């Protein structure tokens, strides 16, 4: 089984750790459902999705299912979000294609791409960053791309072609075994990769395989396919898992009282006090379980909550918070200071951290081995060949949310430079996130604008809208913070770009609203106002409001002429001619 770093197995725990992970429980029907999906794979692509809240057990269910498939000889390829959580363009797709077609991590070169069509080859060049990077981004949203260049739709098409090629290749080399492509946390996967997965499922290659994804509710991936809703574990099973895990650990502790290692002795389970955990009344806080559903389903508890409660109890905690995030936060708070600081730095660096980066972020800490061992024994981090990572996305999120603001800013500011003070070769999207949280507004805005352009060029309108929304929020905040020379102009530019991106995404009502706000900010004349009016004309035309469109266009033309902006005049004129030609 080949796995992305973010998806790598979580088995290798320190021997001193409590008896975790919890034994896999109560998923027979879900496994049977997945088996039935796999059994349907005959001559075509079958798509399936597991949908459930955070911590409900999606990753674990997939892993148990995939482990069995792999042990039968099926080929299992796993992919998922980038380790930084930055929606790095094509990240998930690169992992999927490299795994399926057995390419080197950098995609290799033409000699590795046997049987790929010219379109698929162009797609591979684009996906692995060997092509001409977004050289032909449109200057104005309302104009079509220049002839000869790749349009966003072209890029989207060739990326999907590359994936079709990789899927067919995997199936050919796996035969007579089956191929399974698993995408965990699809909701956090970058939009360009998501598009490719959706396009391939809509128009699959002639290859028999299963594509199975997991995501949280409320996210719409644009696939059809079979869907399975996953809930927590029934309350009685949750309780028995909790009790047996804590008492198992207790028995182990009694046998070897000197070697509890990372599992810190707790007052409750201290063997010397005569009380055995078997007799301790372990329970769930009343509101830890979601109430029974209207459809008559029994109350359930997310297994992540049980896992955290076992650990919290073994660490000597009492009165556990009923909310999962609060329970995780309580555990983080109880860590010794340097262990907590290490965890915070790891959360900032992302899920492929190394010791050198850690050292750079926390220069006053001399040795990390003991701290990392402590965090690993607490089940908070895992160390793999691909780097050090937090053990669960929620743990990373809660850690990030609880870092004091000043500390966080400082950690992000250090995270983009190497020890010699040179910038690290991090993906643009990751640099943007670091600059954003380092409160380096100017750099963050510049990077967000580039990230938005790049997403748009790939046909990833959702990614482009997201980056521009972040930029707009940041620019708005700068009006009060005062670190930018002209924050109002930044708000204006990001509003206009966001309006244009929303229009490209087909969200014309929102586009119109955002552009009208931008128009209020633009002064009475000048090139900025002309551009906003041009975008409003484009949107009005798309909405078939002809007279409104003409009015905006005329006003835009007048202003562009007055400011002698021949480039904008020409481009507006081209839009006018295109309207007339239809
Ligand atoms: N059926 C189960 N029986 C016992 N333990 C489970 C089960 N399912 C999950 N767990 C445990 O619960 C914890 C959370 O599970 P998992 O990471 O799979 O949740 P998730 O739904 O993928 O969460 P997220 O959406 O945040 O990624 C893990 O420690 C896992 O080992
Ligand atoms: Mg998961």
Image (cartoon, rainbow, N blue to C red):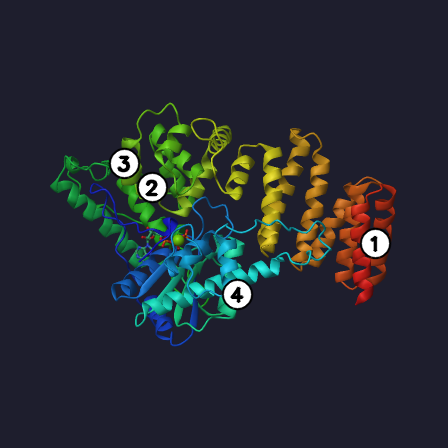
Disc on res. 553? 1
Residue farthest to the top, as pictured: 364
Residue 408 screen position, x and y as percent: 48, 32
Query: Which residue corresponds to mark 2?
Result: 381
Q: Quadrant of ligand 1?
A: bottom left
Asked whether mark 4 and ligand 2 are closer than 8 Å, the reply comes as: no
In this rendering, position of residue 13 left or right of residue 186: left
Q: Nearer the viewer, mark 4 or mark 3?
A: 4
Q: Secondary structure at mark 2?
A: strand
Write the residue at 23% across / 42% down. 14
What residue is shown at x 78% (from left), y 64% (from top)? Answer: 544
Q: Nearer the viewer, mark 1 or mark 3?
A: 1
Residue found at the far front of this picture: 111
Residue 182: quarter of image: bottom left
Instruction: Give the CA separation, mark 4 to mark 1.
Output: 36 Å
Q: CA distance from mark 3 to mark 2?
A: 9 Å
Q: Would you say 467 lies left or right of 61 here?
A: right
Residue at the spot of label 3:
373
Q: Are marks 4 and 1 in contact (CB under 8 Å)?
A: no
From mark 2 to mark 1, how far is it between C-alphas? 57 Å
Who comes first in sequence, dot 3 or dot 2? 3
Q: Are marks 2 and 1 in contact (CB under 8 Å)?
A: no
Report which residue position mark 4 lands on: 199
Provide residue 344's location: percent of width, then percent of height: 41, 35
* Discs 2/4, front: 4
**Total number of numbered discs in the rendering:** 4
Q: Residues within 10 Å of mark 4 (few under 14, many from 20)?
A: many
Q: Is residue 331 left or right of residue 535?
A: left
Of mark 4 and mark 3, the one earlier in the sequence is 4
Q: Earlier in the sequence, mark 2 or mark 1?
A: 2
């Amino acid at each position: 089984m080949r796995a992305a770093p973010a998806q790598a197995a979580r088995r290798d725990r320190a021997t001193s750790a409590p008896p975790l992970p919890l034994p896999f429980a109560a998923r027979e029907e879900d496994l049977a459902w997945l088996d039935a999906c796999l059994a349907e794979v005959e001559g075509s692509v079958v798509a399936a999705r597991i949908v459930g809240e955070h911590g409900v057990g999606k990753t674990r269910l997939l892993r148990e299912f995939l482990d069995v498939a792999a042990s039968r000889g099926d080929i299992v390829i796993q992919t998922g979000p980038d380790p930084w959580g930055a929606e790095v363009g094509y990240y998930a797709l690169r992992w999927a294609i490299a795994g399926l077609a057995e390419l080197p991590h950098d995609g290799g070169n033409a000699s590795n791409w046997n049987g790929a069509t010219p379109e698929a080859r162009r797609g591979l060049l684009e996906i692995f960053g060997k092509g001409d990077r977004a050289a032909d981004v449109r200057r104005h949203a309302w104009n079509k791309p220049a002839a000869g260049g790749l349009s966003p739709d072209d890029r989207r098409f060739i990326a999907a072609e590359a994936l079709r090629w990789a899927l067919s290749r995997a199936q050919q080399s796996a035969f007579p075994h089956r191929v399974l492509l698993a995408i965990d946390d699809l909701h956090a996967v970058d939009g360009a990769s998501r598009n490719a997965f959706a396009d391939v499922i809509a128009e699959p290659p002639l290859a028999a395989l299963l594509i199975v994804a997991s995501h949280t509710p409320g996210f719409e991936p644009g696939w059809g396919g079979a869907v399975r809703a996953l809930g927590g574990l029934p309350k009685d099973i949750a309780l028995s898992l909790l009790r047996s895990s804590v008492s198992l650990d207790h028995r182990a502790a009694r046998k070897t009282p000197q070697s509890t290692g990372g599992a810190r002795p707790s007052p409750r389970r201290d063997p010397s006090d005569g009380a055995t955990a078997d007799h301790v009344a372990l329970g769930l806080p009343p509101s830890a379980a979601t109430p029974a559903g209207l459809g008559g389903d029994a109350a359930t508890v997310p297994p992540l909550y049980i896992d955290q409660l076992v650990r919290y109890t073994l660490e000597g905690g009492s009165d556990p918070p009923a909310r999962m995030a609060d329970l995780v936060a309580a555990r983080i708070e109880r860590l010794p200071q340097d262990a907590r600081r290490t965890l915070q730095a790891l959360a900032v660096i992302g899920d492929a951290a190394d010791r050198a980066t850690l050292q750079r972020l926390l220069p006053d800490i001399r040795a990390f081995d003991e701290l990392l061992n402590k965090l690993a024994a607490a089940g908070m981090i895992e160390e793999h060949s691909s780097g050090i990572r937090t053990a669960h996305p929620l743990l990373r999120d809660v850690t990030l949310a609880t870092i004091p603001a000043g500390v966080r800013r400082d950690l992000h500011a250090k995270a983009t430079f190497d020890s010699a003070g040179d910038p690290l070769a991090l993906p643009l999207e990751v640099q943007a996130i670091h600059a954003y949280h380092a409160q380096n507004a100017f750099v963050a805005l510049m990077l967000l604008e580039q990230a938005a352009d790049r997403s748009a060029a790939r046909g990833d309108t959702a990614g482009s809208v997201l980056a521009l929304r972040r930029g707009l929020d940041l620019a708005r905040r700068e009006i009060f913070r005062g670190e930018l020379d002209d924050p109002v102009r930044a708000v204006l530019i990001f509003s206009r770009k966001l309006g244009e991106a929303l229009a490209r995404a087909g969200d014309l009502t929102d586009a119109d609203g955002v552009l009208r706000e931008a128009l209020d900010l633009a002064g009475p004349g000048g090139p900025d106002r002309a551009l906003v009016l041009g975008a409003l004309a484009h949107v009005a035309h798309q909405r078939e409001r002809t007279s409104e469109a003409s009015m905006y266009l005329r006003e835009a033309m007048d202003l562009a002429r007055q400011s002698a902006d021949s480039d904008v005049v020409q481009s507006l004129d081209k839009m006018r001619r295109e309207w007339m030609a239809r």
